[in-house]
Amino acid sequence: MPTARIATISAPVSATMGSPMNRIAEGPFEVKLSPQPLHEEAVGLFGRMAIDKRFHGDLDAASRGEMLAGGTAVQGSAGYVAFEKVQGVLDGRRGSFLLLHRGVMDRGAADLSIDVVPDSGTEELLGLSGRMSIEVREGGAHFYRFEYALADGA
């Protein structure tokens, strides 16, 4: 099962519903994926992973999440979905929010979207909307680019 490849695809992000994004946060992050048990009917069909991340830079935060991935008999074709709760400080504002991942690889061509779940922002991140892209550079270093907006326009 190609779960490691699925978790590290880099591709353009899709448009997020709502207002245009007027802020950008960027920086490195570390990610740890830990295999988790599946119910018996899914064994051999899917892979399930716990996600632990630590973001640095404009987003100083930690996240925890769950990923479900599936591959095919065709090399380079697979997909995954994931949710993660991010908690920390975004450009000086404290709070948490949820990210929804959808990744598809079609014979090696990647399509990845990582979007903020509407109305998931808390505390000083109320009204947060946005989308994130990830890049895995040579040597395996991970970087994020988070395009976002807040309901108050800040």
Image (spheres, grey):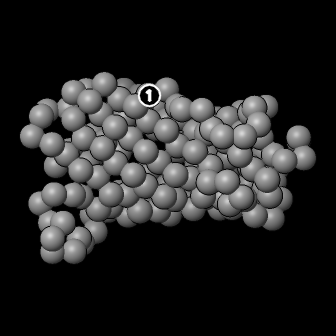
Q: Which residue is mark 1?
A: 11
Query: Of all residues shown, which one is farthest toward the front?
Result: 17
The answer to whether residue 19 shows anywhere in this view is yes
Q: Is residue 136 visible?
A: no
Quick one: label 1, few (<14), some, or many (20+) residues within 10 Å? some
Q: Is residue 144 left or right of residue 7?
A: right
Who is closer to the viewer here, 117 or 60? 117
Image quadrant where residue 38 sits = bottom left
**Residue 5: percent from the left, percent from the top?**
27, 40
Q: Look at 84% across and 47% down and name the residue there.
A: 151
- The image position of residue 3, as x and y in percent, is 25, 48
Judge by depth and name the residue closer to the eye, 121 or 28.
Answer: 121
Q: Nearer the viewer, residue 70 or 27?
A: 70
Kindly identify the residue that appears in the image at 29 percent across and 62 percent down: 48
Q: Residue at x 19, y 45 (%)?
A: 71
Secondary structure under the numbered disc 1 in the rendered image: loop
Q: Position of residue 149 (x, y in %)?
A: 77, 40
Considering depth in this image, is 85 or 119 the residue closer to the camera?
119
Which quadrant of the figure has residue 57?
Answer: top right
Q: Position of residue 37 (x, y in %)?
A: 24, 72
- What residue sits 39% from the left and 52% below the top? 81
Position of residue 20 relative to residue 152, above or below, is: above
The amino acid sitting under disc 1 is Ala
Q: Is residue 85 above or below residue 152?
A: below
Image quarter in which the C terminus is found: top right
